[in-house]
Image (tube, helix red, strand yellow):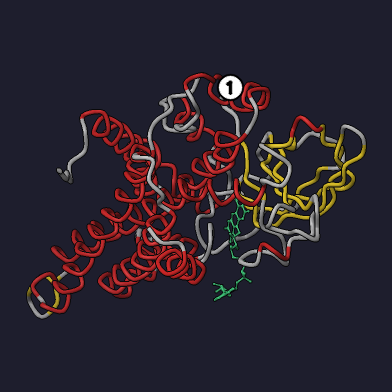
Amino acid sequence: MSVSFGLSEEHLTFQEAARAFARDVMRPAAPHHDQTGTYAYDVLKQAWAQGLMNTHIEAAYGGAELDALAGVVIAEELAWGCSGIGTAIEANGLAQQPVILGASDFLKKKYLAPLADTFGLCAYAVTEPGAGSDVQAMQTTAVKQGDKYVLNGNKMWITNAGVADWYFVVALTDPAKKAKGGMTGFVVERGWEGVSVGKKEPNMGQRASDTRTVNFDNVIVPEENVVGQVGDGWSLAMAACDYTRAAVAAASVGVARAAMEYAQEYALVRKTMGVPIAQHQAIQFMLADMTMQIDAGRFLCWNAAWRKDQGLRNTKESSMAKAFCADMCQKVTSDAVQIFGGNGYSNEYPVEKLMRDAKIFQIYEGTSQIQRLIIAREMMFRGK
Ligand SMILES: Cc1cc2nc3c(=O)[nH]c(=O)nc-3n(C[C@H](O)[C@H](O)[C@H](O)COP(=O)(O)OP(=O)(O)OC[C@H]3O[C@@H](n4cnc5c(N)ncnc54)[C@H](O)[C@@H]3O)c2cc1C
C-alpha cells in the first residue's frame, strides 16, 4: 500500500515542457487573441509540433498515447498560459476521445492518424439549442437509408466548430429510445454537402476559442462513419467526459493559479496606510484561501486521472474535480480582482481576463449543478 503526491520523471518532463510553452508562447499571444477574438492558429500549430496536442491518440495510430494524468498536468499549464487557447487545444482531445474509445480501426486510421501526423482540428458536437443539460431533448436525427444515414439538425456552442476538419456528432437513430440505445455517434466532415457553421459567438471570456452553431441539412453520412455500435452514442459521449472533465478541472486550477500569482505579486508592492497591502490580514487571508483551494483542487484532478489510469471507475471523481475546481476558480479569480482594487477592473491589468475566462468552467462539459447530480447519483445509486 503506498500513496504518492509527486509526479514521475516522465510527468515532470511534460509539466516543464507545457509550462515553458505557456510562458514563452501562449502568454505573449494571449492579450491579442482575447481582444480581437481571432483564432490562435500559430500558437496551436506550435503546440502540436511540441507534442502538447492530441496527447491521447493511441501509439498504433501514430499518437503519443499519454495517460490521463499527463493530460491533466499539461491542461493545467496550458490554461495558466491562456485558457482560451488552451480550450481550443483541449477541444481536439474531447472530440477524439469517443473515437479512441469506440471507433473501428478504419475510422481511427482515417480520422485520428492524420491528426498525429499533421496539424488539424476537430470538434465534439453534442449540445443543441434546446438540449444542453437535458441531452434527452436532442432533436438531431440520423435516418438510415441503405448503407448511409441522412443527418438533419442543429448543434450549438460547439468549440472549434469553424476550424474543425471533422466533428464527433451524436444524433437520434431511434427517437423513442433516446439515451437508452437511441443515440448514435458519427464522424462527420465539415466539408460534406449540407454541413454549415454559424457566426463566431461573441463570448464573455476564453475569446480565443471558436464557438459556433453547426447545422446539418440532409447530410449523407456513410455507414462506416458510425462510431462504435448503433445506439452507443450517449455512452461514448459520456465515457469521453470521464477523461476530459478532469482536464477541464485542471485547466480551472491553471487559471486560478495564474490569478493567485498575479495577486500575490501585486499585494507585495501596492501600498496603503504606509505598508504593502500584503501586510493587511484581510489580504493575507484571501491569498491563504487561494493557495489552499488551488492545492485541494489539483489533488482532486490528479486523483480522478489516476483512477482512470488504474482502470478504476472515475465518474464521481471527475465530476467532483470539475465542480470543485470550476467553483474554486470563479472565487479565486474574483478575489484576485478584489486584491487589485480598481486596477483589477481594468483590462490594463491581467486579472479581469482571468475572471471572465473562469466563468465558463462552471458551464461547459456539464454545469456545476449537473456535476452535483452526477456525484449524488454515483455515491447513492451506483456504488463504488
Ligand atoms: C463557450 C462554450 C463552449 C462549449 N463547447 C461545447 C462543445 O464543444 N461541445 C458541446 O457539445 N457543447 C459545448 N458547450 C455546451 C455546454 O456544454 C452547455 O452550454 C452546458 O451543458 C449547459 O447547457 P445549456 O447551455 O443548454 O444550459 P441549460 O441546460 O439550459 O441550463 C440552464 C441552467 O439550469 C441548470 N439546470 C439545468 N438542468 C438542471 C437540473 N436538472 N438540475 C439543476 N439545475 C439544472 C443548469 O445548471 C444551468 O444553470 C459549450 C458551451 C459554451 C458556453
- In the rendered image of this protein, does residue 328 appear above or below residue 93? below
Foreground: 87 or 167? Answer: 167
Image coordinates of residue 266 in percent, x first then y, are: 21, 63
Q: Quadrant of the C terminus?
A: bottom left
- Between 212 and 208, the one nearer to me in the picture: 212
- Please give the name of the residue rendered at 62% of the width and 46% of the height, measured from the top-left corner: 124
Q: Please, which residue is most extreme toward the right here?
A: 146
How many callouts does the rendering have? 1
Image check: 313 left or right of 225?
Answer: left
- Percent across and percent down for residue 115 are 57, 26
x 33%, y 66%: residue: 328
In the rendered image, residue 154, in percent from the top left (x then y), is placed at: 78, 55
Which quarter of the picture shows residue 74?
top left
Q: Could one spot residue 27 in this view of the protein?
A: no
The image shows residue 246 at horizontal and vertical percentages of 40, 51
Kind of residue at badge 1: Ala
Q: Is mark 1 within 8 Å of ligand 1?
A: no
Q: Which residue is mark 1?
A: 113
Neighbor class of circle 1 (other Cα within 10 Å; few <14, some 14-19, many 20+) is: some
Query: Ligand 1 sits in which quadrant?
Result: bottom right
**Residue 128 in sight from this viewpoint:** yes
Q: Nearer the viewer, residue 275 or 4?
A: 4
Q: SS of the residue at dot 1?
A: helix
Image-based side of 329 in relation to 93, left or right: left
The structure residue drawn at horizontal position 45% and vertical position 60%, both measured from the top left corner, is 357
